[in-house]
Image: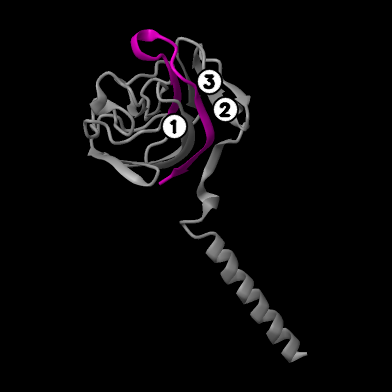
Amino acid sequence: MQRRTTLTTLACAAAAVALAGCASPGADASWMTLIDGDKGLENFNRIGDANWRAEGGAIVADQGKGGFLVTKASYKDFAIRAEFWAATDTNSGIFMRASDPNKIGADSSYEVNIWDIRPDPKYGTGGIVDFAAVPVPPVFKAGGKWNTYEIEARGAEVTVKLNGQQTVKMNNGKFASGPFALQYGPGVQGVTGGPIKWRKVQVKAL
């Protein structure tokens, strides 16, 4: 009887260790998934006239004068992982810590850009518009393939990685907290740009 009790105790202890490992700070359980394939539109408020829809295993927009999917929650210190597909002429981005959730723009949030042919290339793909420039001629391109953005914001420090490569790192405290937004924007000189597709979007509070 004592041997069986000892074995049971050891088994429970092993299970507790395993569960503790699963709950470690780096575990995926701490990430909140907002878009997973073609699911997740209900997690956002829509601003503008972009034709957001579920299509082909992603959340897609390719028509309209411009629009955003705005998170319903606000974030201060956070990490974002986002898988997206863009065409060469797609104008999109992730706008973070938006001070006005009903009026998203680069003057009221940090815009991590997706725009390979932006007229001013120093704030093209991988840059933070008006705050952190990328090299010119552009070396970071998103057009014609699936990409991953990894963004981390801790206080005034913001780091952006595109497909595992750091594009910019800045220290700026202008915007402290707010929702983030996914953009579909007009192309060069207002013409219709290429589509944007979001396949996975996750956020984690830090």
The residue singled out by tag 3 in the image is 61
Q: Is residue 23 above or below residue 185?
A: below
Q: Is residue 198 one of those drawn in magenta?
A: yes
Q: Residue at x 22, y 34 (%)?
A: 135
Q: Is residue 94 above or below residue 48?
A: below
The kind of secondary structure element at disc 2 is strand
Residue type (three-letter) at the residue carrying disc 1: Ser
The residue singled out by tag 1 in the image is 74
> From the viewer's perspective, is 94 left or right of 32?
left
Q: Is residue 193 one of those drawn in magenta?
A: yes
In front of the other: label 1 or label 3?
Answer: 3
- Decide: few, some or many residues near mark 3? Use Cα within 10 Å; few <14, some 14-19, many ≥20: many
Residue type (three-letter) at the residue carrying disc 3: Ala
Pointers 3 and 2 in contact (C-beta within 8 Å): yes
Asked if residue 7 can be seen in this view, the reply is: yes
Q: CA distance from mark 2 to mark 1?
A: 21 Å
The magenta segment: 180-206
- Decide: few, some or many residues near mark 2? Use Cα within 10 Å; few <14, some 14-19, many ≥20: many
Q: Quadrant of residue 127?
A: top left
> From the viewer's perspective, is 135 left or right of 30?
left
Front-most of residues 181 and 115? 115
How many numbered circles are shown?
Answer: 3
Pointers 1 and 3 in contact (C-beta within 8 Å): no
Q: Which residue, as the protein is rendered here, is positioned at the far bottom?
A: 2
The residue singled out by tag 2 in the image is 59
Front-most of residues 115 and 24? 115
Lower sequence index among marks 1 and 3? 3
Locate residue 170, reporting x and y percent.
24, 38
Q: Quadrant of residue 109?
A: top left
Q: Residue at x 57, y 27 (%)?
A: 59
